[in-house]
């Protein structure tokens, strides 16, 4: 169960990073959003495989916009094979001009149980080699919708970008 929480947390954080870094079509606005919107912490994960997961993130949004993640899908891959799929269960709105707790409801399904066991074993050894994440989402900001995608970002690059250390990982 803890490995499922780790996979879930990593993909949700990646989705939020995608929102911050690729959600706008103008470089100046994108830079502004990157500086003003960010995940401060993971507060809680509750739920189950049957009912879905509720991930509570502490998110800072100092902009005048309240972006909404309308649809989202993520894939966790191990050595090029899909291991798990995450799907946003309902839209998520990020309040403007504040730091707040945001609940992100996601459904997680394991598509390759044997690879999932290998993934957990690698994570238990603090080894993320061969682990990648792909994400896609539809974001609405100020009445404009935009599809974004991140294809096969290496787990170590993602973790470094988020400032997350494998030493914190507990399986």
Image (spheres, helix red, strand yellow):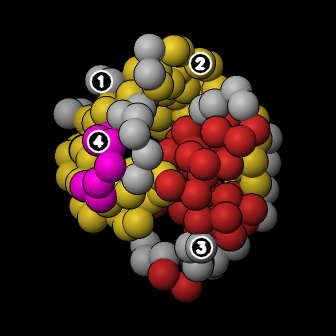
- Mark 3 is surrounded, within 10 Å at the Cα level, by few (under 14), some (14 to 19) or many (20 or more) other residues, namely few
x 55%, y 39%: residue: 19
Residue 163, position as x, y percentages in the image: 59, 73
x 25%, y 61%: residue: 44
Q: Nearer the viewer, mark 1 or mark 2?
A: 2
For label 1, the residue is: 90
**Visible residue check, residue 158:** yes
Instruction: State the SS at label 4.
Output: loop
Instruction: State the SS at label 2.
Output: strand
Tag 3 or tag 1, which sits nearer the N-term? Answer: 1
- Mark 4 is surrounded, within 10 Å at the Cα level, by few (under 14), some (14 to 19) or many (20 or more) other residues, namely many
Instruction: State the SS at label 3.
Output: loop
Q: Is residue 166 above or below residue 71?
A: below
Q: Is residue 13 above or below residue 142?
A: below
Query: Residue 60, located in which quarter of the rendered image?
Result: bottom left
Q: Disc 2 versus disc 3: distance between alpha carbons?
A: 27 Å
Q: In the image, 78: left or right of 104?
A: right
Q: Disc 1 versus disc 2: distance between alpha carbons?
A: 17 Å
Residue 49, position as x, y percentages in the image: 29, 39
Q: Disc 3 versus disc 4: distance between alpha carbons?
A: 23 Å
């Amino acid at each position: 169960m803890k490995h499922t929480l780790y996979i879930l947390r990593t993909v949700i954080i990646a989705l939020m990073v995608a929102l911050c870094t690729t959600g706008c079509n103008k470089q100046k606005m994108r830079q502004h959003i990157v500086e003003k919107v960010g995940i401060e912490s993971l507060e809680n994960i509750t739920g189950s495989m049957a009912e879905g997961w509720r991930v509570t993130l502490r998110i800072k949004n100092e902009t005048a916009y309240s972006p909404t993640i309308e649809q989202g899908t993520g894939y966790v891959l191990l050595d090029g094979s899909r291991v798990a799929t995450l799907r946003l269960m309902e839209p998520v709105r990020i309040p403007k001009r504040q730091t707040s707790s945001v609940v992100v409801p996601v459904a997680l399904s394991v598509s390759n149980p044997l690879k999932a066991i290998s993934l957990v074993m690698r994570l238990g050894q603090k080894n993320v080699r061969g682990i990648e994440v792909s994400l896609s989402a539809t974001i609405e900001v100020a009445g404009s919708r935009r599809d974004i995608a991140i294809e096969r970002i290496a787990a170590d690059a993602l973790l470094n970008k988020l400032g997350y250390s494998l030493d914190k990982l507990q399986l």
